[in-house]
Amino acid sequence: MPAETEIAVEDTVVEEGVVGVSRVEEEGDIAADYLEELLDIADIDGDIDIEVRNGRTYISIVADEETDALKTLVGSEGEVLDALQELTRLCVLSATGNRSRLVLDISGYRDQRNVELVAIAKGAAEKIEGGSTAVALPAMGAYERKIVHDAVAELGLESESEGEGSSRHIVVTAAQQD
């Protein structure tokens, strides 16, 4: 059964009185076609939802029931999901010549993980408040580090990424007093 696509678009391009397709809307369409084909090849049922928020395309693959096949597409700790996101971005780059910042989510994994990442940031903040001068967090990918950096900043602390490659991690410290 082919996947259904639902599109919610907030930003279109108006040029000389003609409404055109925005870059992010185009990238969403290309990504959805790619992912629909992938789901068909893998014989996995799922619906594809596309949403544009703040100039970025968010694509979700969801199903009426959580299936093992969708869990497999997420993988342990999201590594398969990250790989699919990167492949989808490469597909968009190949088709448009433009780098994409699209975010792919499957069965709400990223939303759930975001809650966990904010809890990790709050845990580090508690350690700093308890007297630690610096708290090193576990290694994580760039997308997750961005979420943690933002959460740490909202808590009034500072954070910095350290390390290389798969060992790259965040170190949280108290904000510098001027």
Image: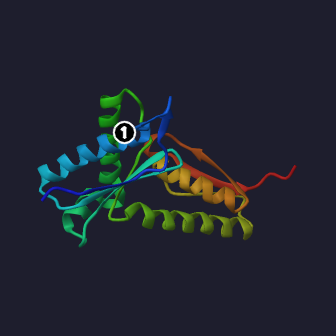
Residue 9 placement, left or right of 161: left
What amino acid type should be assigned to the residue bearing mark 1? Answer: Glu
> Is 138 on the left or on the right of 6, as rendered?
right
Q: Quadrant of residue 30?
A: top left
In the figure, residue 112 lies in which quadrant?
bottom left
Q: Which residue is painted at 53% across and 51% down in the image?
A: 145
x, y percent for residue 11: 49, 45
Quarter of the image holding residue 28?
top left
For the point 21% across and 69% down, which residue is it? 67
Q: Nearer the viewer, residue 142 or 39?
A: 39
x%, y% of residue 177?
85, 53
Name which residue lies at 50% across and 46% down: 168
- x, y percentage for residue 22? 43, 38
- The single residue placed furthest to the right in the displayed view is 178
Name the residue beneath numbered marker 1: 26
Q: How does the figure colour the protein chain or chains?
A: rainbow
